[in-house]
Image (cartoon, rainbow, N blue to C red):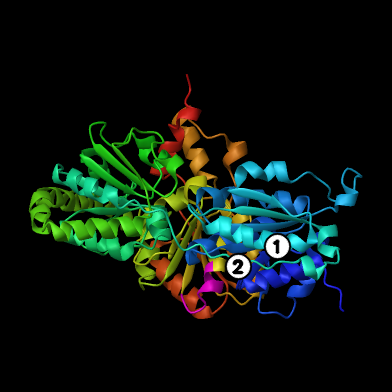
Amino acid sequence: MEKVIGGQLAAEALIDKGVEYIFTLSGGHITPIYQFLENTKVRLFATRHEQAAVFMAEAWARMTRKPAVAMVTAGPGFTNALTGIASARLANAPVILISGCVGLESAEKLDLQDMTQLPVIAPMVKKALVCHNVERIPEFIDMAFRYAENGRPGPIYLELPCDVLNAAADMTKVKKYSSVVEKRVVDLDSAAKIVDMLKEAKNPLVIAGSGAYYSDAGAEITELIEKAGLPLFTMAGARGLIPDTHPQCFESSLAIRPGAAFMANVSTDLVLFLGGRLSLFYIFGDIFPSTAKFIQVDIEPEEIGRNRSIDLGVVSDIKALVKEINRIIDAKKLGGEFKKQFAPWMEFLKKSDADGKEQAKPMWESKDVPIHPLRLANEINKFMDRDDDIVVADGGDTSTWMGMTRTVKRPGTYLDYGLYGCLAVGLPYANAAKVKNPDKRVLLVIGDGSVGFNFMEFQTAIKNNLPIVVVVANDTLWGMIAHSQTLRLGHAIKDGTEIGLVHYEKLVEALGGFGAFVEKAEDIRPALEAAFKSGKTACVNVLVDPSTISPGSVALANLGGYKVG
């Protein structure tokens, strides 16, 4: 009988799970798995840095709402992956990180790339697992998938020592597991309480967050706002779950977005918060009036009540709960009554939306040279006008400007770094988006600071024939830091904030891609057209005004932890 080793059991378990891609950078400690994935239906997608591999897995998990796998080698491979795991944790992305490590017999012998890995990563993940028994490898892989997607999604760490991967298995002791968890926590009893609270409100607000996206509650939330005449805002993963173009969707809930968000947040008397977090983006809950009633719905009990007293906390799957709310509204024939009750509020928000956008119009249409970064964001938004176009944003000020502008029509088509605020996600996210959606247009807008982190992922894109278009918003600075320092100190500290003019487009051309350099606003669209027409991985390097300060920079200057005095 042919010997079966741990690496083969791991490979077969991943194949059985239907894994399409493993995002990875090779290394000796994980070669036993590699050798049994070669020439299988699982594609080993190699990046130039482990961080990029985990970012690609994060983007894949966010787009598919299913577990995605990254695999790295021991020691430095493991530590290089940590930033991506921290990002996945705050994004609620079900990423499974498989890492090799030194063999058990070599621990504490100063073997190559030896380090104690588990205690380092355990606080950063939902669950950290180490398999020390070769026969249990399939069980541990099934466990990792189950933990990643059950309840609130999140990253899982699975460590497989190389001597376990190389050990021969006693096949009579191997059990292959395949657990599927369909049922989610549902609290239907709270639906009636929510309806009763709506009866008492004049200015209610529905905010849908990542929990609504992972619950796939778009149809139910759309039915609710249409049935009851409610205004909706979206955040994080829920952007596009209900299209921004829906007449009752007022786009992003962030107050810095031109439109109705600020006035809605500060004027509401009832917030129905569906699967979101009361984070910095809501001034830790303080942006809402202290007198407003607050209903928080989340699959994770510990999340309810963070930063604010909650009038009604509901631990529930959002899709099922909203479906029950709709049933009660129908049964009690409250739809017409609610629409009449909330009509003045809706008219107020529509006017606020128009007024807010009118104030931003001079910046969106600016003809200044250097180019106003909000004009660049607007040109990208107008050009990427197909419902299924995918836009990725990376960079401090750059992500802020794009987030203030992008019209999102479908879920999973707008990706940024979210709450973790991690630069360097852009190229891996864009590459993953193009691998997942080869027939869709993918554009990344990225700051000139961010583009330096994972620059060689341009080569990854070129090597794999991924014709993404990357627009560099080039202000020759670490702009957000320079601007926040100017606001706090009266000047930017040059040694830490100046980058200088770099022709990134020429570097991409040298790698085999397409490059263009833009200095005037009217040349942005022709450059984008040429970039997409080239059929190559493309870099459009756009000089933007280095003096323009974004709301994000203002927020950073005033962030509590950085205040002086």
Going from the N terminus, do you reach mark 2 or mark 1 first? 1
Which residue appears at 12% of the width and 56% of the height? 332
Residue 307 occupies quadrant: top left
Whether residue 259 can be seen here? no
Residue 126 counted in the magenta span: no
Tell me if 279 is positioned left or right of 506 in this view. left
Tell me if 58 is positioned left or right of 407 in this view. right
Question: Which mark is drawn over residue 335?
Answer: none
Tell me if 248 is positioned left or right of 510 in this view. left
Give the residues drawn in magenta, as a range.
433-440
Which amino acid is tagged 2? Answer: Ser
For disc 1, the marked residue is 48
Instruction: Tell me where residue 470 appears, x and y as whole percent.
Output: 52, 65
Instruction: Tell me where residue 308 appears, x and y as whole percent.
Output: 35, 33
Instruction: Tell me where residue 367 appears, x and y as whole percent.
Output: 34, 57
Q: Residues within 10 Å of mark 2 (few under 14, many from 20)?
A: some
